[in-house]
Image (tube, helix red, strand yellow):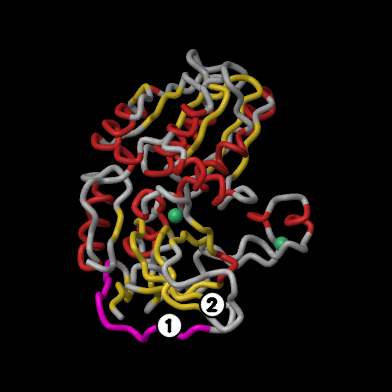
Amino acid sequence: MRAAVYRSKGVLDVTEVAEPTLGPADVLVEVSHCGICGTDLHMVMDGWGQPDSIGGHEYSGRVLATGSAVAEWRAGDTIVATPQLEGCGACRDCERGRPSLCAARGKPGMDAFQGAFAERVRVDHRQLIRLPEGLSLRAAALCEPLAVAQHAVTRSRIAPGERALVCGAGPIGALVVTLLHTMEIDDVRVSEPGAARRDLAARLGARVLEPAELVAPPLPFDVAEDAVDVAFECSGKPSAIEASLAQLARGGRLVLVGTGMEHPTLDANRVLLNELVVTGAFNYDAGGFERAIELLAAGRLPVDTLIEPDDAPLEGILDAMNDLTAGRRAGKVLVRPGD
Ligand SMILES: [Zn+2]
Ligand SMILES: [Zn+2]
């Protein structure tokens, strides 16, 4: 089968690879659509990937074949799949409903992962979620990033009537904006330097700011003039993390959901004097994929605004990654490995 294989920084090889072989609990899936994630960009453009790995974890598809121990799936079933098993179910964190912290989870980004930038992918049947009638495979490919955005919203404990800032209007930032709207949180502003992403945020109904407009109060006990209760930091940039913290009202929460390798400076006095909470959001809520599928199936999200109009074949992934890195495309780019 054909796949886009990562070789080294900036190098993706679209080539024939061996067909996956199924273990008893596995299912073979024909990939329909697979989104390009910020993680995939880091793996390829920043060289974080394992050589000879295949990226792509935001996919939808159809079951082609099942292993001998799989009873509940049939060829033709339409699915999305979690990138790994949702927690071991037995450790302390799984027991308290926090599978994203599972003691048995892999090392993020470090495990050899054979993903869905390929015509077919092998997956453990316990990772599959069935698609409801009427939800398109194209829209369903938003499930994974939507579950990530939902987890960030859950971690923020935001309530109706509170004010929110989203830093960075990439796919996760854009999905956070749309989720906040479904929760009747109307005061949502987005800080984003890129023109195409600013335009996307405006089309999603957010108030758009230039990063320079986020002025930090000079003294740590002062609160910004137009402060927010919750800031979602979706860019991973140290300057944006520092600016988000300085926009919080007293008792405010900063949720870190963007990743980067450089560390910000933490104004500990600002945290202390204003009783701020800084937290991370990694992966998903328990049952997050099921909830994301429900939301998508309910038709409450502006899927056509969130997804870029032109899907890419495997050969188009690198061009799309260059466009995304340069800010020429703002929405979620989907790959169609079968094209
Ligand atoms: Zn992702
Ligand atoms: Zn666990």
Q: Position of residue 74 (x, y in %)?
A: 49, 71
Q: Relative to residue 239, is residue 319 drawn left or right?
A: left
* Image spot of residue 125 (x, y percent): 56, 70
Mark 1 / mark 2, whichever is N-terminal = 1
Amino acid carrying label 2: it is: Asp
**Three-letter residue code for mark 1:** Pro
Q: Residue at point 51% right, 20% down? A: 218
Q: Is residue 328 above or below residue 197?
A: below
Residue 331: assigned label: none
Element marked by disc 2: strand
Q: Residues within 10 Å of mark 2 (few under 14, many from 20)?
A: many
The quadrant of the picture occupied by the C terminus is: bottom left
The question of residue 170 being in magenta is answered with: no
State the image quarter where residue 297 is shown: top left
Q: Residue at x 56, y 45 (%)?
A: 291
Q: Which residues are magenta?
A: 10-22
Label 1 neighbourhood size at 10 Å, few (<14), some (14-19), many (20+)?
some
Which residue is the site of mark 2? 26
The residue singled out by tag 1 in the image is: 20
Q: What residue is at 62 percent from the left and 19 percent from the top?
A: 221
Dots 1 and 2: beta carbons under 8 Å? Answer: yes
Q: Position of residue 299 (x, y in %)?
A: 42, 37
User: With respect to residue 293, does 113 lie above or below?
Assistant: below
- The N terminus appears in which quarter of the rendering? bottom left
